[in-house]
Amino acid sequence: MDSIRFTKMHGIGNDYVYIDCFNQKLNPEPSALAVKISDRHFGVGSDGLVLIMPSDKADFRMRMFNSDGSEAEMCGNAIRCVGKYAYDRNLTDKTTVTVDTLAGVKELRLSVKDGEVSNVRVDMGEPVLQPDKIPVEGSGESFINQPVEIEGEIFNLTCVSMGNPHAVMFVDDTAKAPVETVGPRIENHIIFPRRTNVEFVHVVNRHRLDMRVWERGAGETLACGTGACGAFAASVLNGLCDRKVVMGLLGGELELEWNEVNNHIYMTGPAEFVFDGDFYLK
């Protein structure tokens, strides 16, 4: 029976199955494989599948598939794990590496302790605010704190792209936020032609935000790196926080900074190895 060697990793609880495509050939179609391998009862169990591949424009290429099989542009937590995998498994000896994604080439700075990567700082690039590039249907040059009616309810949303679409709403208490009911309704609303990730954000103070996330194609997850950056940008745009914060998510914390010089958002957080295994194809 054919099998695929894989590695399970997570970034603050946002867990993915990683396949090293440098050292093995992937025969199954990755979208279908993502559905099977991500199943938490009949598969390995994960938020999705990540392929680590050669690139002709960067040190590595990352393809990322959600647990429903849809391919996503980027994942901030997953890309940190790609950096850790590449260094710890001797695919590179550099502590600054570039990764090609569908959201562009991202630069990673690896913090190494006792010969292994502990934290990764990712240059997430500039947040995109133009509605047609997010994409979201809306007039004007941005989509900030705009009311959207969904099934008779009004939600004030701020929309941002970090290479993938995000709709951010502010709540008084993330524990009571209607993530599982409102999240999918916003995700699939007609104004989002490619669907959207949905972030529920509580502003603790100018330097601290808490967030829960409904991820497009995966449902609620313990963390979302691009979502944290999008929610952070939305909070700054609404005048609710400073340009350097700690973002608390269900799975842990990220450090975020929006640089005023180059307009890039930088995300710093951990990457963790869980286990290796073989997935047998049926």
Image (cartoon, helix red, strand yellow):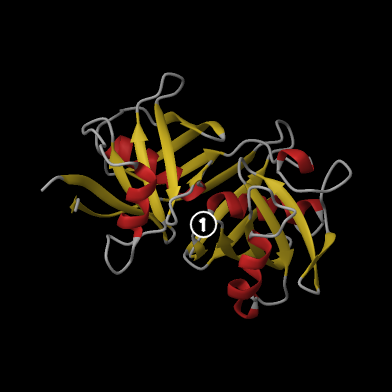
**How dense is the environment of label 1, judged by Cα within 10 Å: few (below 14), some, or many (20 and up)?**
many
Nearer to the camera, 20 or 245: 20
Q: In the rendering, at what x and y percent does residue 69 appear? A: 43, 51
Q: In the rendering, at what x and y percent does residue 202 appear? A: 69, 69
Q: Is residue 256 visible?
A: yes
Image quarter for residue 199? bottom right
Q: Residue at x 80, y 51 (%)?
A: 237
Q: In the rendering, at what x and y percent does residue 58 appear? A: 44, 23
Nearer to the camera, 77 or 116: 77
Q: Is residue 68 above or below residue 133?
A: below
* Count of numbered circles on the image: 1
Q: Amino acid at mark 1?
A: Gly
Left/right placement of residue 89 relative to residue 142 reads left
Q: Secondary structure at mark 1?
A: loop
Please name the residue that numbered disc 1 is placed on: 217
Q: Residue lying furthest bottom in this view?
A: 176
Q: Is residue 242 visible?
A: no
